[in-house]
């Protein structure tokens, strides 16, 4: 069974109620088990440019690179699989492309974008992210944020200076500490985990979680669990009903059945040695 047959995906993006245009970009490639969400920032329409470069560049690099990862071995220094290293490098290269464009085009100076990339490969879910766009996972009755925001709020919380409630009241929500395209180099967080049948993964721009509490997101996913598209549309509607201050993008992925191990780097390695 192909990865596309094992995944159900819904993708909804909305401009919101206060922004003149949508600076979010999303891309879903079920054939490669790949989804990407980017939330752009910058001058007039520059955020759109940055987020579009990010998703296009990352998609091209990963879809091309997946054909070659079978020849690679796990990185002994950091324990990352070839597929994780591929995703990480694709995000790094996207940063270079966005930064270069911003330096050459005066209208794009200062542009940047957050990004969250999810790749289902073998039996694993790989996530790479920069900025405050998020990945959540619903597994049974448990709902958890998988990524950790690269934001001033999160930094203050992590250092113990504020509780989450205090930080939300005293700190602007949209101040990110990392983004693609702002500096010539960027640090990318990468993680892997086993993807289980009936897991639901949610990628979102901060237009959702700034307006809708995690508990309400969880309740909405539970209520509309039978229909991912309806769930995604309801989450966007909720964000708009609470003010819609930003663009809101939501990608939902359900793992329909157990993903095959056939594409996993470890299985290939063991298969060759047996």
Image (tube, rainbow, N blue to C red):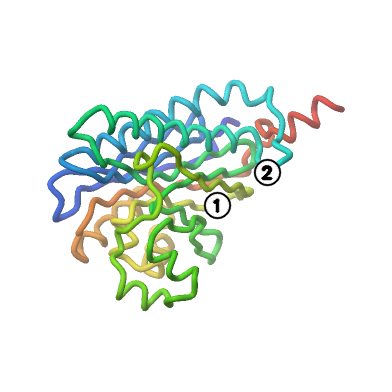
Q: Residue 198 carries which label?
A: 1
CA gap, disc 1 and disc 2: 30 Å
Q: Can residue 40 be seen in this view?
A: yes
Q: Which mark is residue 147?
A: none
* Residue at left offset 44%, top offset 25%: 60
* Residue at left offset 22%, top offset 35%: 108
Q: Quadrant of the C terminus?
A: top right
Q: Mark 2: which secondary structure?
A: loop
Tell me the crowding category of disc 1: few under 14, some 14 to 19, or many 20 or more residues within 10 angstroms, Cα based.
Answer: some
Coordinates of residue 242 in the picture (x, y in percent): 21, 66
Coordinates of residue 253 in the picture (x, y in percent): 46, 46
Tell me the crowding category of disc 2: few under 14, some 14 to 19, or many 20 or more residues within 10 angstroms, Cα based.
Answer: few
**In the shown orientation, is residue 72 left or right of residue 212?**
right
Closer-to-camera residue (162/190) = 162
Q: Please tell me in which quadrant of the rendered image residue 163 appears.
A: bottom left
Q: Mark 1: which secondary structure?
A: loop
Q: Is residue 227 visible?
A: no
233 relative to 239, above or below: above
* Residue at left offset 24%, top offset 51%: 247
Q: Please tell me in which quadrant of the rendered image residue 49 appears.
A: top left
**In the shown orientation, is residue 224 left or right of residue 121?**
left
Closer-to-camera residue (249/155) = 155
Which mark lies nearer to you, 1 or 2?
A: 2
Q: Please tell me in which quadrant of the rendered image residue 164 appears.
A: bottom left
270 relative to 110, above or below: above
Coordinates of residue 139 in the picture (x, y in percent): 55, 59
Q: Name the residue under label 2.
A: 78
Coordinates of residue 70 in the picture (x, y in percent): 67, 25
**In the shown orientation, is residue 269 left or right of residue 264?**
right
Q: In which quarter of the image is the N terminus?
A: top right
| Marks 1 and 2, the one that precedes in the sequence | 2
């Amino acid at each position: 069974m192909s990865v596309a047959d094992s995944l159900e995906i819904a993708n909804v993006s909305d401009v919101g109620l206060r922004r003149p245009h949508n600076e979010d970009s999303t891309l879903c490639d079920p054939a490669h088990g790949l989804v990407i969400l980017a939330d752009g920032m910058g001058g007039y329409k520059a955020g759109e440019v940055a987020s579009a470069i990010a998703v296009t560049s990352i998609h091209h690099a990963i879809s091309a690179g997946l054909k070659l990862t079978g020849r690679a071995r796990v990185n002994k220094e950091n324990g990352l699989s070839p597929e994780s290293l591929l995703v990480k490098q694709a995000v790094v290269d996207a940063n270079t492309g966005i930064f270069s464009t911003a330096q050459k085009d005066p209208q794009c100076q200062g542009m940047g974008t957050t990004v969250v990339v999810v790749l289902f490969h073998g039996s694993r879910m790989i996530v790479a992210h920069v900025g405050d766009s998020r990945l959540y996972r619903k597994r049974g009755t448990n709902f958890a944020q998988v990524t950790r925001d690269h934001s001033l709020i999160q930094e203050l919380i992590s250092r113990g200076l504020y509780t989450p409630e205090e930080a939300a009241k005293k700190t602007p929500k949209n101040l990110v500490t990392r983004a693609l395209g702002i500096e010539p180099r960027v640090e990318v967080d990468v993680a892997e985990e086993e993807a289980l049948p009936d897991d639901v993964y949610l990628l979102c721009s901060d237009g959702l979680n700034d307006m809708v509490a995690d508990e309400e997101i969880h309740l909405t996913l539970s209520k509309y669990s039978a229909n991912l598209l309806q769930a995604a549309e309801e989450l966007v509607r909720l964000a708009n009903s609470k003010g819609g201050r930003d663009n809101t993008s939501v990608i939902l992925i359900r793992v329909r059945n157990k993903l095959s191990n056939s594409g996993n780097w470890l299985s290939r390695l063991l298969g060759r040695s047996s």
